[in-house]
Image (cartoon, helix red, strand yellow):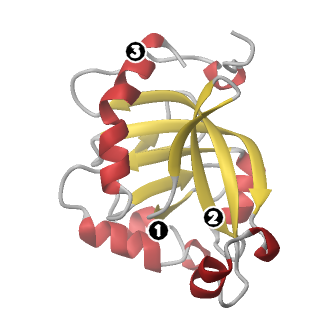
Amino acid sequence: MDDDSKKMLDVISKHIIQQLPRGIFLSVGGDTPNTMTIGWGSLGNYWGCSVFTAPIRKQRFTYPLLLKEKSFILSVPDNDMARELVLAGTLSGRDGNKFERIGLETKPGRVVNAPAITAAKWQVECVVRAETDMLYDRTDRAIAEKMYAAGDFHTLFMAEIVACYQKDGVSAPEQSGAAQRTCLRE
């Protein structure tokens, strides 16, 4: 991640944490681009990298797309996009193009092959570096019984943040191939 992206991530980290309970768009590219609403996730540092961990259930349409594409964009709204977030969280990409059905305009990511939702103020581009399945016997019993009664545990996608920019104003420069450069090799 370049210095401008690092500075922008410092600026928007609190917005990501505050917005998560209200919803953030997670969008994946490829042959069938899709977006979904996530309300859980975490920012952290693994392997010397800034990382976002996104929990995704296996039955979600986004799950196999993410396994294949290995990258996504978080589009973080700061305005009233409650309707769009609800629709992105309830409609399925299996039934057609959610971006069109919801009325979300997109533009290509700067670094990763995924769509950025233009109405959102901030974009966080991520490349998946690890995935791990949550397991019943490794999850607190009360959480497992309350949140996973159907046994539909999440897979945690741990993704390096490779670019971070704001819709207007400060932004990271366009980068070519930056998704291939990992902080592990810098």
Q: Nearer the viewer, mark 3 or mark 1?
A: 3
Q: Nearer the viewer, mark 2 or mark 1?
A: 2
Q: CA distance from mark 2 to mark 1?
A: 18 Å
Q: CA distance from mark 3 to mark 2?
A: 29 Å
Image x and y of residue 112, in percent: 59, 34
**Residue on which the image places disc 1:** 98
Q: Earlier in the sequence, mark 3 or mark 2?
A: 3
Measuring 60% from the left and 77% from the top, which residue is drawn there?
143
Q: Which residue is mark 3?
A: 4
| Residue linked to disc 2 | 56
Residue located 78% across and 55% down the image: 132
Quadrant of the image containing the N terminus: top right
Label 1 crowd (10 A; few <14 / some 14-19 / many >=20): some
- The answer to whether 183 is drawn above or below residue 64 in the figure is above
Secondary structure of the residue carrying numbered label 2: strand
Residue 101 in picture, x, y percent from top left = 40, 71
Mark 3–mark 1 contact, CB under 8 Å? no
